[in-house]
Image: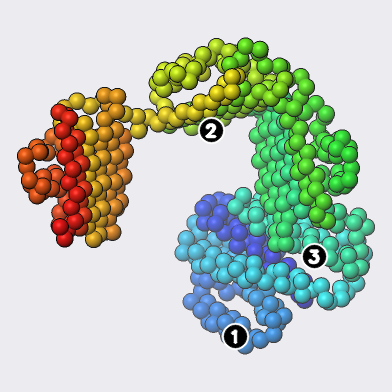
């Protein structure tokens, strides 16, 4: 009976995972619902179901709650919840049948979704408990092979559901299938279930990660198994012709038969491991890049990484190249460029990556990156004595960067051993300003519930500025660069100060210009006037 409870609970889980999709698209609800009805419940049974749109439905739920309250044994309570899960599924199917071909009332679907979500919560919490509790019981003989294997039938049913389920349900389906496979393996290990194919080999891996790159073809597979679930993802991309992405149950359906063909062990030579993996995935030996990480159930591991940078055919760096290491990154609102080069002994490594806002990213590695980057670096003449703006201009020209940019970063190690690190940020770059009566200005004022700091300084004929306001009630403000200047310049234009004024008059004028209201505890004002004179005021409330 407990096995039946698990099957019903799993069925409710599948239906509940499908509910968001049902709420979203009426046509998909009708199509999927028809398939569920025809396979799970006979029509004459659905005719007798009391559904949520009945005025007597509340009585049905009342008696269900009474039944739950007065059921005390854990195994009996699990059976009650299994029955209720099946009843919610039956109600769902009855509503589907009743409203087939019509617009389903959204309120009805919300009520049904709420009920199924309650069952889903119970199912998630107790599924593993029920399965583990089942281990201690003898399995009655029901024949050999698949005909007597309820686990295989459950797995097959879940896989059929997965074929039509939305992507949002695949994770839950994967977990349900993993539970069924794990319990089946336990029964086989205890000798309580006959398995002619010994399918327990599917779970020889705890983790499996693979990346194979061949010309314009990329294959990535990721599989992780833990106590509660199995996660799987597969990505297959071939130029602009193919882009396949599988997750959850669909990824498992692809990976498990492949795993079955490998028959790997951590003690195998690297060449044999690579050959077995390539053969299982239907790939030839002509790969450009291969990364493989496997963690077996017994704790042993395989870690193989063959990068094009390790290829002996990598060209030697030019003898007259000025850089041992070069890293450049520049970013705008709609694009980003990263370029890396490193010379080690008689070999060179390179990577170039371009990210675009529309998602059309591209990446070059190994020989392809070197072929692109070396001509640029050979023509790039940089020197640590150059002005910062001149270095950035040379970089933009060398890389053919057109349009605006927000920030950039450069890290260089020259062939003579010297190093250079620079950063540029467009919004913080100093801005030429005229008409400011100060060379520098600093204000710090504090009360019991707020603080303000404003600073302006002149450097190389240009001004840099920042404004920070922190307050217990209200939003904090932080301005830098041009935004801070735009805030401060109107204030300075109406601020009339001179050294002959008293400290009190200066403080009052400054606070009024900055719209400071109320008392203050501490204040500091430092001003360097254009004529070279300096003013410093520091006060506390008790002064």
Quick check: marks 1 and 2 in contact, CB under 8 Å?
no
Q: In this view, does 166 lie above or below 356?
A: below
The nearer-to-camera label among 3 and 1 is 3
User: Reading the chain from its start, which is encountered first: label 3 or label 1?
Assistant: 1
Residue 416 versus residue 156: which sits nearer the camera? 416
282 to the left or right of 472: right
Q: What residue is rendered at 15% in x and 33% in y?
A: 533
Q: What residue is rendered at 87% in x and 35% in y?
A: 271
Which quarter of the rendered picture does the C terminus lie within?
A: bottom left
The residue that label 3 is drawn on is 183
Location of residue 373 by image quarter: top right
The residue that label 1 is drawn on is 69
Q: What residue is rendered at 83% in x and 29% in y?
A: 285
| SS label for mark 1 | helix
User: Reading the chain from its start, which is encountered first: label 3 or label 2?
Assistant: 3
Task: Give the image location of residue 3, x and y in percent.
Answer: 77, 71
Task: Give the image location of residue 113, x and y in percent.
Answer: 54, 64
The residue that label 2 is drawn on is 359
Q: Is residue 214 above or below residue 157?
A: above
517 to the left or right of 469: left
User: Reading the chain from its start, which is encountered first: label 1 or label 2?
Assistant: 1
Few, some or many residues within 10 Å of mark 3 (<14, 14–19, 20+): some
Marking on residue 107:
none
| SS label for mark 3 | helix
**Disc 1 and disc 2: Cα gap in Å?**
55 Å
């Amino acid at each position: 009976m407990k096995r039946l409870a698990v099957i019903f609970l799993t069925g409710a889980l599948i239906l509940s995972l499908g509910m968001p999709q049902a709420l979203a698209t009426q046509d998909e609800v009708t199509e999927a619902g028809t398939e569920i009805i025809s396979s799970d419940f006979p029509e004459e049974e659905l005719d007798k179901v009391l559904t949520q749109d009945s005025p007597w439905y509340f009585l049905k739920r009342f008696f269900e709650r009474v039944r739950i309250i007065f059921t005390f044994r854990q195994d009996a309570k699990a059976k009650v919840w299994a029955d209720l899960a099946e009843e919610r599924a039956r109600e769902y199917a009855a509503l589907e049948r009743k409203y087939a071909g019509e617009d389903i009332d959204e309120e009805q679907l919300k009520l049904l979704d709420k009920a199924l979500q309650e069952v889903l919560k119970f199912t998630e919490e107790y599924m593993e408990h029920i399965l583990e509790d089942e281990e201690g019981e003898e399995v009655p003989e029901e024949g050999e092979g698949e005909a007597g294997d309820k686990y295989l039938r459950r797995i097959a049913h879940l896989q059929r559901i997965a074929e039509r389920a939305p992507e949002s349900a695949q994770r839950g389906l994967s977990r349900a299938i993993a539970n069924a496979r794990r319990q089946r393996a336990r029964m086989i290990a205890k000798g309580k279930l006959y398995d002619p194919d010994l399918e327990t080999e599917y779970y020889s891996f705890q983790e499996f990660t693979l990346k194979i790159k061949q010309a314009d073809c990329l294959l990535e597979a990721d599989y992780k198994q833990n106590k509660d679930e199995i996660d799987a993802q597969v990505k297959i991309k071939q130029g602009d012709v193919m882009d396949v992405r599988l997750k959850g149950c669909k990824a498992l359906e692809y990976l498990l038969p492949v795993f079955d063909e490998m028959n790997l062990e951590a003690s195998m030579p690297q060449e044999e491991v690579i050959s077995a993996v390539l053969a299982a995935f239907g790939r030839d030996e002509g790969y450009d890049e291969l990364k493989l990480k496997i963690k077996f159930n017994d704790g042993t591991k395989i870690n193989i990484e063959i990068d094009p940078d390790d290829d002996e055919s990598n060209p030697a760096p030019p003898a007259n190249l000025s850089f041992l290491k070069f890293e450049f990154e520049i970013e705008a609102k709609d694009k980003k460029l990263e370029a890396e080069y490193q010379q080690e002994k008689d070999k060179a490594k390179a990577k170039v990556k371009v990210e675009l806002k529309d998602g059309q990213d591209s990446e070059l590695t190994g020989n392809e990156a070197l072929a692109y980057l070396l001509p640029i670096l050979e023509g790039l003449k940089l020197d640590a004595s150059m002005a910062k703006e001149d270095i950035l201009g040379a970089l933009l020209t060398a890389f053919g960067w057109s349009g605006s940019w927000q920030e950039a970063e450069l890290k260089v190690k020259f062939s003579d051993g010297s190093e250079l690190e620079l950063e540029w940020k467009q919004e913080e770059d100093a801005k030429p300003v005229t008409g400011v009566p100060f060379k520098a200005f600093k204000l710090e004022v504090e009360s019991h519930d707020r603080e303000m700091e404003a600073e302006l300084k002149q450097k190389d004929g240009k001004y840099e500025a920042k404004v920070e306001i922190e307050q217990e009630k209200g939003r904090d403000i932080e301005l830098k660069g041009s935004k801070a200047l735009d805030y401060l310049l109107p204030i300075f234009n109406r601020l009339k100060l001179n050294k002959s004024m008293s400290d009190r008059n200066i403080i009052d004028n400054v606070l009024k210009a900055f719209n400071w209201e109320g008392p203050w505890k501490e204040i500091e004002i430092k001003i360097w006037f254009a004529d070279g004179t300096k003013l410093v005021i520091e006060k506390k409330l008790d002064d």
